Image (tube, grey):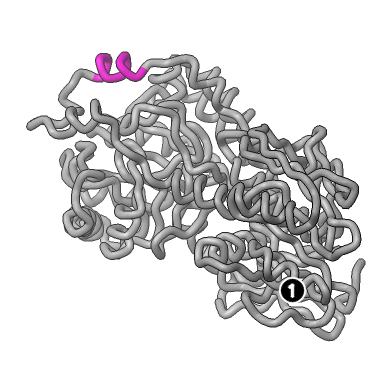
Amino acid sequence: MALVSELHPVVLKAETNEASNALQDYAEFWKIPYRLNLLEPKGSVLFTSDRATAAQSSVHGPVILTPVGREEAQKTASDAGVGVTSENKLLRLPVRKGITVSLRTNVYQYSGSRIEPLLVSEGTTIISRIIGSNIHLVGLDLVTEYSRLVHGGFEEIPSRRFSLVAKLPFSYQSIPSFIRNRSFRTEKGLSGLTEENLGPVECLRTVFLASLVRIAGPIPRIGFWRRGKAYALSVTHDVETQAGLEQGAKRLMEVEETMNIRSTWNIPSDRYPLASSTLIKFAGNGEVGGHDTRHDGRLIFLSVEEKKRRLASCRGTLERLVDQRIRGFRAPLLQHSAGLAEALYNAGFEFDSSCPSWEILSPTSLRSHGVGTIYPFYMRNILEIPVSLPQDHQLIRVAGQKPSAAVDLLLKLARWIRGVGGACILLIHPDYEFGEAEHKQDYERLLESFRSDQECDIMTLGEMTEWWKVRKEARIQMNDNKVSIISPERSDMSSELQPQLVTGYGGDGFNVVNI
């Protein structure tokens, strides 16, 4: 194992706030030790998006450069006396044996006698070195693509058709469900449930860390989940109707109690009569979250202040009924935007699970849509936990699958998320098929697959939020020839943080050892 003295410090430098934020987000995601916009210590590796910084710093040590935009890529090539071409390609990179992550993006291919390829995937050069210098070139724009996928994907633009329906004097729910389901029915969407759509951000993150490991050598980091766990699961329910509350929820809860699984129950505060005893039972078997007031699809059209008042009303009503703090929220129809995230934070919520990693058909935008990551991330001071697995309504009511086939597909996608090490966020409505007695065995088969996996970290969304906060505040410390973790959080969770060392990257992905 590498000694601390053999590890190279990482420094991040950028010329714009967008670039600085993106590079810092990559480093914070992996929880590697780094310095931001500071003088490079001796033996350090610099990761930058600025050509001038790269040229100046390369006389002192290795530099990794990710040019921002086509023009900067061309200027980078011109400075080095090499050629460059740009082509939109599907990149596929391994993260571990048999597991890959993918992204379709513009790739810059540098060529000439001074270019030495260092990392090549399926014939496409991802990282190359300018011979005779310490400058290493990343063949894609890690800054612009990150902003496009995460921030751009988070802004869902309502379609004209949905906007008209939402502004009718009655709720869209007044339209018979068979008509609504038929209008959204599509089978083509299932083919889009791929790693390229579910987790393209994971491909960008892989390029970032692989670049450092290839050029700097071993890099310490903090594991994503509690010691001994490879991935996580949260079981969540959006209770849309009174029938779902009184009948389907009871059936789902019976299955979960048998397996000792605690789940998150998202409840609209003013849509149907709520009994305090019912919500207290939900909280006792997991937790209760907000699901708007009336579930009418109009939340996304309100101003930030109107959103705040409505969300505060939802939270206040539920808190009075359940007699405990309501920390989490999920918007009806998985509506999401930066404005909604800001309103949620101002209304006192701590986390939100309203954005899909990717969904077949958004009822709001009427197109395939998602944020492209299977991990939690912060947006406007609130933790966003993406719905990483397709919800039951999308698979059964939109794509027309049978419940048993839907379970098969969910487990297939969960195996990929497990391989990447992400968070499986399961959304099951008690109002639909899985809440019916005849499909109890399907639901049992789904949960049993996770429960029987000892490497699955099962937690509610609130518990995941607590864990992610502890991990966020923790830092890698290197001294006395040891790598350790320091954390300001004084909780049992801090002791569960796992320091790791990424020792290499190759055809089977990352080589990782626990420290």
Image-quadrant location for residue 398: top left
* Image position, residue 237 (x, y; %): 39, 40
Relative to 75, say whether 408 is above or below: above
Magenta part mainly helix, strand or loop? helix
Q: Would residue 300 appear left or right of 91 to someone viewing this image?
A: left
User: What residue is drawn where x is 56% and y is 27%?
Assistant: 193
Q: Position of residue 379 (x, y in %)?
A: 43, 58
Residue 379, above or below 99: below
In the visual, does 17 lie left or right of 348? right
Position of residue 33 measured from the top left corner of the image (x, y, whole percent): 70, 72
**Crowd rating for badge 1 (residues with CA inside 10 Å; few <14, some 14–19, many 20+):** few
From the viewer's perspective, is 164 left or right of 184?
A: left
Q: In the rendered image, which quarter is residue 180 located in?
A: top left
Q: Amino acid at mark 1?
A: Gln
381 part of magenta stretch: no
- Residue at x 82%, y 51% (from the top left corner): 128
Which stretch is magenta?
177-184
Quadrant showing the N terminus: bottom right
As drawn, 261 above or below 252: below
Image quadrant for the C terminus? bottom right
- 78, 324: nearer the viewer: 78
Q: Nearer the viewer, residue 117 or 394?
A: 117
Q: Single out the residue that lies furthest toward the left.
A: 169
Camera sees residue 272: yes
Residue underneath mark 1: 56
x and y, in percent, of residue 52 in the image: 68, 68
> Which residue is pictured at 71% across the width and 60% down the height?
65
